[in-house]
Image: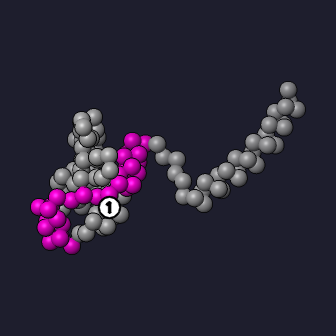
Amino acid sequence: MLKKLKFYLIGFLPGLIIVFFILNKKGASCSYFPNDRVIGESMTKEVSIPTALKAQLASQNIDTKYLKDSIIAKGTIDFDKSQAQKQPFPEYYMTSPEKNPKYELTYEKTKDSVVIKTFKKLN
């Protein structure tokens, strides 16, 4: 029995180390918390902004790239204020950044895109 365990560990430990380095180089993440999953999935979709909201964002010098890469990517979903089970598309309430929030927004996550519903700069 001890011999089998020794052979198992001789193969398992180097394999674990090799897999760790390969996945680390590819930038794979293993975070399965609900906040990280929702934001990760949202980052893969195109951001759609209604015309009325585009003017508001333009007046604050916020473009779509900044909205996606800096505000959504660094935000926190408040699941108490969100409607994650809403049909046909879930709606999420987010503050960003995680510490000392400067922005709050709500967005709807459709099949192909993220539709920004509201955006507000906090004082």
Q: Could you tell whether 101 is left or right of 24 in the image?
A: left
Q: Position of residue 85 (x, y in %)?
A: 27, 34
47 or 122, which is in the foreground?
Answer: 47
Residue 51 appears in which quarter of the rendering? bottom left
Task: Confirm whether the magenta stretch covers residue 57.
Answer: yes
Task: Confirm whether the magenta stretch covers residue 5.
Answer: no
Q: Could you tell whether 47 is left or right of 117 in the image?
A: right
Q: Quadrant of the N terminus?
A: top right
Q: Quadrant of the C terminus?
A: bottom left
The answer to whether residue 122 shows anywhere in this view is no
Tag 1 residue: 68
Q: Residue furthest left?
A: 52
Sort mark 1 into few (<14), some (14-19) or many (20+) by Cα contacts within 10 Å. Answer: some
- For the image, the number of numbered tags is 1
31 or 55, which is in the foreground?
Answer: 55
The answer to whether residue 68 shows anywhere in this view is yes
Q: Amino acid at mark 1?
A: Lys
- Assign a secondary structure to mark 1: helix
Span highlighted in magenta in the image: 33-61
Q: Could you tell whether 6 is left or right of 114 in the image?
A: right
Q: Position of residue 115 (x, y in %)?
A: 24, 53
Q: Position of residue 39 (x, y in %)?
A: 37, 51
Residue 49 appears in which quarter of the rendering? bottom left
Residue pictured at 54% horizontal, 58% vertical: 27
Residue pictured at 32% horizontal, 50% vertical: 112
Residue 50 appears in which quarter of the rendering? bottom left
Q: Position of residue 84 (x, y in %)?
A: 28, 38
Q: Residue furthest top?
A: 1
Q: Is residue 3 above or below residue 105?
A: above
